[in-house]
Image (cartoon, rainbow, N blue to C red):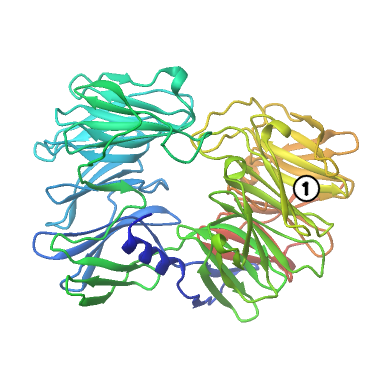
Amino acid sequence: MNNPTLLRIALLLILSFTFPALAKSRDLGNGFFDHGVCAPISQHRGTVATTDGLHDVVLSLLMDHRGGYELLFIDVDSGKWSEHTFPFNNPGDSPFSSILSREGKFYTHFGSHFLEFDLAKRVFTFNKETPPMCAMSMTEDDKGVIWSATYPNCGVVSFDPRSGKFRDYGSVYSQNWGIYPRSIAADDTGWIYLAIGNAATQMLALDPVSGKVTPILDESHRPPGMANLYRDLDGKVYGRALDIRADASFQSNPWWEFYRGEAKEIGKDCPQHPKPYITGSQALFHDEFPDGKKLKTFDLENRHLVVEDQNGHTNDLHFDYASEGAIVMSVIASPQGTITGGTTFPMRCFTFDPRTDTMTSRPAFHQWNAVGRSSVASDHHIFIAAYPQGYLLDWNTDEPWVETAAEKSIGNPRALTNWERDTNRPTCVVPLADGKTVIMGATPDYGLTGGGLLFWNRQNQQQLVLTDKQVIPDQSTDCLLQLDGQTVLGGTTTAAGSGGEKKAGQAELYLLNLNDHHIEWHKPIISGVQSYQGLHRAGNFIVGVADYYLFFVFDPAKREVIYQHNFGEEFGSTAGQQGPRVFVTGPNGEIYLLATHAIAQVELGTWNLKPLVKPHSAIGGGGDYLDGEIYFISGSHLFSWQTSARKS
């Protein structure tokens, strides 16, 4: 991010004050309470400062926990705004790319729908259903045709606004992993070029007439990473590929020149003169109006924007928009007697205090995928495993909150360490009973297969990382449970990193020795299972959930599964978040299972799942226990159920 204005806007969004809100919990009956939205804010997925021909306007694609849901249109001159609901039933997807055409129309493509918005008419004027799923890049050719390249099957579509002709080229390139076509460009003859990743890079040339596609890179020169290309002012297209295993730049990779469908390697130097387009990823923020004014501030939390003219005069406007709140990723009972956790899009930390019935939220460092609390009673620390870049955070809840600044090693929560390659997208975090060690499991960086384990020593402030080759090759750890002072039980997933290639046939359970960090035993203990979502101690046994529907009991002494039950038809699935808390423990050792459509209790010995109650809203993000209530997430809301309300 090298745009100073964009940096200031990002800082305003990140460093804003704590956002207080009266929870006003609602009694739903039967012991259930709705404590409200955890973070009542939406996230922009592409924002453009432009004109509708008469007025300066700001366009912003908005998403909340439902996915993309509306286009916010703000008339800067009049101070009025309007909300334009997307004209299709969105399955939960969100925009990942958008473009403002030279003719002043705004386009995006997500939820398997290609959309055109006419700024002058202030309505959606084109809506076309497409194959799955969303554009990762968009461009406009020299004839004004809009092009879109989509995830996950590398689909390409084009739309001519003048004739209304829409063409679906289908999937133009096939792989056995989800393809991210993050760049698309047209040369001045009309040929189209795409750059893709992540499991392997590639660049493609597409004949817009015949639809024929030609891969550029030889199969032996396709490292994992991302290729990138752009249209130059000379009418040609230039691109190169990044090898994620080598470094974080493109400097070691050769440039390619593309023209009329032909490609040639031109070396490592390429003076760049990119042709300007108002397009980009979901982070698109175009802050310059055509008349030279600047969008200095765009604050969705406080519903406030500031426009500055060439003389430094500013125009402050307040606007509003409807939001159902951010996606909730994690929830945990804190040592302070509150319920807390993290949201994403935007990334916030929320805290609900049941004693005062208040909900607050504040900016959080990254996305809190998994949260864990020390089992040592006097240890009031919560540990957070955060995406992206695989950060481990330490939050001392006895001390005041201080904004996390990882680069300065300050903040509470404090960023302890990170390891992007092997632990990019965390799935679990477990503080060990010794009070000295924290373990984080995760899937790897984009395009890679097999995640590692990160061990953090709280005494000497040092880390140890085990790669998948040292744990279970080509798999990642989805859940962890400490068995005793020297052994940890882990459950894996066969899922690769985003855009990576799945290579393992079935998930496994494993035992890891904490003394020398070697794997003592591992086995695909339940045939065909692809992931283990949760592990929980039940006396001398371990209860768990596999593939979201399969409850099982594991005997660690015999290293075998002694009981299985598929509860899908009766209860639905367990939580599907990236670091779910599937099991909840009551004050007397009761074990509760949280499923989509039921809260059930594990009956020790018989191992039956006794249904206790059906929630008013589907449980989606796991939960925790506090003072007689089980707290859980549904959508963007925090709910609770009083266990005393259970029927005998």
**Is residue 532 visible in this depiction of the protein?**
no
Q: Position of residue 380 (x, y in %)?
A: 74, 69
From this viewpoint, is residue 323 visible? yes
- Which quarter of the image is occupied by the C terminus? bottom right
Residue that numbered label 1 is attached to? 481
Q: Position of residue 584 (x, y in %)?
A: 73, 57
Q: Is residue 541 left or right of residue 533?
A: right
Asked if residue 505 is positioned above or below residue 463 in the image, the reply reads above
- Number of residues whose C-alpha sits closer than 10 Å to that of mark 1, classed few (under 14), some (14–19) or many (20 or more): many
Residue at 58% of width from left, 41% of height from top?
A: 421
Q: Is residue 116 left or right of residue 109?
A: left
Q: Secondary structure at mark 1?
A: strand
Residue 401: percent from the left, percent from the top? 60, 73
Asked if residue 182 lies left or right of residue 456, the reply is: left
Q: On the image, which quarter does residue 72 sit in?
A: bottom left
Q: Nearer the viewer, residue 410 or 472?
A: 410
Quadrant where the N terminus is found in the figure: bottom left
Residue situated furthest bottom in the rendering: 356
353 lies above or below 294: below
Residue at 47% x, 75% y is 17
Pick whichever, 66 or 366, lies toward us: 366
Q: Identify the residue shown where x is 15% and y is 31%.
A: 188
Residue type pointed to by label 1: Leu
The residue sitting at 23% across, 68% down in the picture is 81
Q: Position of residue 451 (x, y in %)?
A: 63, 38
Whether residue 484 is situated above or below residue 159 in the rendered picture: below
